[in-house]
Amino acid sequence: MAHQAPARAGADQRERTADRELRRRATAVIPGGMYGHQSAGPLPPEYPQFMRNGRGARVWDADGNCYVDLMCSYGPVVLGHQHPKVEEAARAQAELADCQNGPAPVMVDLAELLVATVRHADWAMLAKNGTDATTMCCTIARAHTGRRRILVARGAYHGAAPWCTPRPAGVTPEDRANLGYYTYNDMESVQAAVTAAGDDLAGVVVSPFRHDAGFDQELVDPSFARGVRALCTQAGAALILDDVRCGFRLHLGSSWEPIGVMADLSAWSKAIANGYPLAAVLGSGTFREAAASIFVTGSFWFSAVAMAAAAATVGALREENAIEAMAARGTELREGITAQAAARDLDIRYTGPASMPYLSFAGDRNHELASVFAAAAVRAGAYLHPRHNWFVSAAMTEADLATALAATDAGLAAVQSHLANHDK
Ligand SMILES: Cc1ncc(COP(=O)(O)O)c(C=O)c1O
């Protein structure tokens, strides 16, 4: 394995041959060359499309170029790549079996562990992707209430099924017919949407904080969370917390536990198995019967390896104080970048929780400056994103942080010269 040093800022001197050749082949056999959130198409050309391996907080692309990983596979990798305890648990289960005629005993172990860890949960159901989990929450809420309407925040992302995909292609109005909309952190708008739903309100889906891609992040106003909770209770509707992106990154007991607001149903995926494919719906006793009444399944939903990985992930998160480690490293990253921007007289906004930050530039149009920044940071060896929140893993060392900060400074220097050239 070629552990090449992170590339220097300036001209892109990294080897790109393997990536170019894979992209050429992919264009012939994969629609659009690539699809979904991992398509490098909309990113600056400096981004590799194909990744080869990862360890701790470092990843290597198909050409062997090394990066400090500030995207963590868009969220799943929370303890770092190839975490020894998670890999060992997955390997031990794989030696027994993965996909069988029935679930392995580890499914019960994991359900018990999740119920013991997440405060509002009395039961757990497992699936594969975050979209499975958010969709199941809506189905359970409807089964419980016998009503149709689900409220979501305008612009929030809850997955890629027709009811929630952000792209209109292939979606019919009927797919969205039973949705109502509110504005995040705006209690009046929730009240109005609840009133409009009348006696047909099944549930309200809400994210732990406003983490819409492409926008500055907004932490939840605790009075908003409490207000939504009260309205759901009053209406007999389900409060559905979409913890797919934040779950096990902000708090082990669910992301709203610190503010004392309990969901009825919560959707999980991404970080729960440190990169192994797994999702979960957790719920309170009131919704247990409805959860048992719906038919949901999938060929791979009962596969045991990801469940063993999840049980080990939850254990390691606790043993290693991973939440605190991510917050501490994230704070150092924020302080470092904020100081770099001040030294270069750049007006940045650094929003979101320390371990899930988002960087934008004052007056930036169409993410032009963010793209200049990200492209230079990638060239200098930090894999981050110009329009999506970043993720800080618990595996990040002081050395990783130093490399990341050297790369972000290269990114800020590129923005400074871009602005200087523009002003001429
Ligand atoms: C908040 C949130 N909900 C749901 C999803 C959908 O998860 P998945 O892509 O695993 O289906 C995502 C994915 O990014 C997410 O961030």
Image (spheres, rainbow, N blue to C red):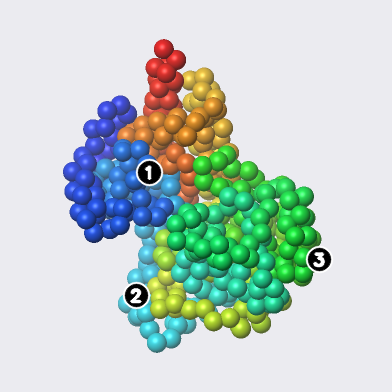
| Residue behind mark 3 | 234
Q: What kind of residue is marked 2?
A: Ala
Q: Position of residue 267 (x, y in %)?
A: 57, 65
Q: Position of residue 181 (x, y in %)?
A: 66, 55
Q: Residues within 10 Å of mark 3 (few under 14, many from 20)?
A: few
Q: Nearer the viewer, mark 3 or mark 2?
A: 3
Task: State how far apart marks 3 and 2 are (Cα).
Answer: 47 Å
Q: Compare marks 3 and 2 and give the one earlier in the sequence.
A: 2
Q: Is residue 314 visible?
A: no
Q: Residues within 10 Å of mark 2 (few under 14, many from 20)?
A: some
Which residue does the image show at 45% across and 61% down from the upper left?
A: 170
Q: What kind of residue is marked 1?
A: Pro
Q: Is residue 308 left or right of residue 112?
A: left
Q: Are marks 3 and 2 in contact (CB under 8 Å)?
A: no
Q: Name the outermost residue toward the right.
A: 234
- The response on whether ligand 1 sits within 8 Å of label 2 is no
| Residue behind mark 1 | 42
| Nearer to us in this view, 293 or 191 | 191
> Which numbered tag is attached to residue 94?
2
Q: Compare marks 3 and 1 and give the one earlier in the sequence.
A: 1
Asked if 385 appears above or below 293 in the picture, the reply is above
Q: Is residue 221 left or right of residue 281?
A: right
Which residue does the image show at 46% across and 69% down from the upper left?
A: 128
Q: Is residue 191 visible?
A: yes
Which residue does the image show at 38% across and 52% down from the upper left?
A: 38
| Nearer to us in this view, 163 or 256 | 163
